[in-house]
Image: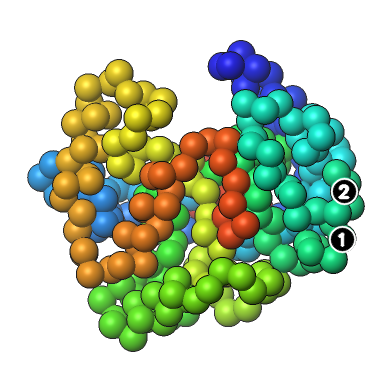
Amino acid sequence: MKSLLCLAFAAAAFAAPADAAEYAGLPGGVFASVLPADANNADVKVAPFRLRREPVTNAEFLVFVKAHPEWRRDRIASVFAEPRYLAQWTAVDVLGTEAKPDQPVTQVSWFAAQAFCASEGARLPSWSEWEFAAAADATRADARSDPAWRAAILNWYAQPSTQPLAHVGGAANVYGVRNLHGLIWEWVDDFNALLVASDSRDQNDPDRLRFCGAGALNLRDRDNYAVLMRIALLSSLKAANTTANLGFRCAKDGAGDGR
């Protein structure tokens, strides 16, 4: 499986990159993550990074699968995605009425999301990077202490998930990043290290078990239910899983220049 995965990602990474997407530069810093760095509740250090300003759309993912047909739903290896992968598309290379071009792509596995990001010289963000970006509102780098801000985010989580997804876009946070809340859930690179799970890839690593277990037991900010819900969802998934409300965006190392 590892060799197959490496070959698939290498093919995506060395092929012609996708059309240049806009990335916002984030400064990083010492950050009070809801999942602390160790059992002593240490803050997390986030290095400067770049993050896609918006989630990947159906139109963008369609370009990707046409360029990399091994990631089409009729050709993808079963180890990389469950049968629901891209099930909302009318055909393997046609979006149709249930998947608008400007809607975020969903029903994608972690494997497929990583391969897309590799195709544009990027990767999935870590949980710490995603949480760092998602703590911001339009004017503040960290709005998490604002009860009204928390309530607005939690209200979205309480809505039924049967409505069609909105298009990407809308108001940006202080870093110029959009749709971190109120549109979809998003994959992160280390989703299965947020809590100890039976299928963790590094389960035999005693440090991984010690620190991840510590994080699960010492969750800070327990009244931030929206964050805890996101952790619960992500930690329950396997890399081949897909859902109707789970998409992704990509990240790159370094603050960069927006590309």
Residue 91 is tagged as 2
Q: Earlier in the sequence, mark 1 or mark 2?
A: 2
For image coordinates 68% across by 45% down, the residue present is 84
Identify which amino acid the numbered label 2 is placed on.
Answer: Ala
Q: Position of residue 177 (x, y in %)?
A: 55, 67
Vertically, is 40 above or below 199? below
For image coordinates 52% across by 49% down, the residue present is 187
Q: Quadrant of the N terminus?
A: top right
User: Do tag 1 and tag 2 residues touch (Cβ < 8 Å)?
Assistant: yes
Colour option used: rainbow
**In front here: 23 or 32?**
32
SS under mark 1: loop
For image coordinates 32% across by 59% down, the residue present is 228
Q: Which residue is mark 1?
A: 96
Q: Is residue 190 left or right of residue 212?
A: right
Query: Dot 1 surroundings within 10 Å: few (below 14), some, or many (20 or more)?
Result: few
Q: Position of residue 173 (x, y in %)?
A: 50, 74
Vertically, is 156 above or below 197? below
Query: Dot 2 surroundings within 10 Å: few (below 14), some, or many (20 or more)?
Result: few
Identify which amino acid the numbered label 1 is placed on.
Answer: Gly
Vertically, is 126 above or below 29? above
Q: Position of residue 136 (x, y in %)?
A: 41, 71
Q: Quadrant of residue 88?
A: bottom right
Q: Is residue 252 left or right of residue 118?
A: left
Q: Quadrant of residue 101?
A: bottom right
**In front here: 259 or 40?**
40
Count up the numbered dots.
2
For image coordinates 20% across by 54% down, the residue present is 219
Q: CA distance from mark 1 to mark 2?
A: 8 Å
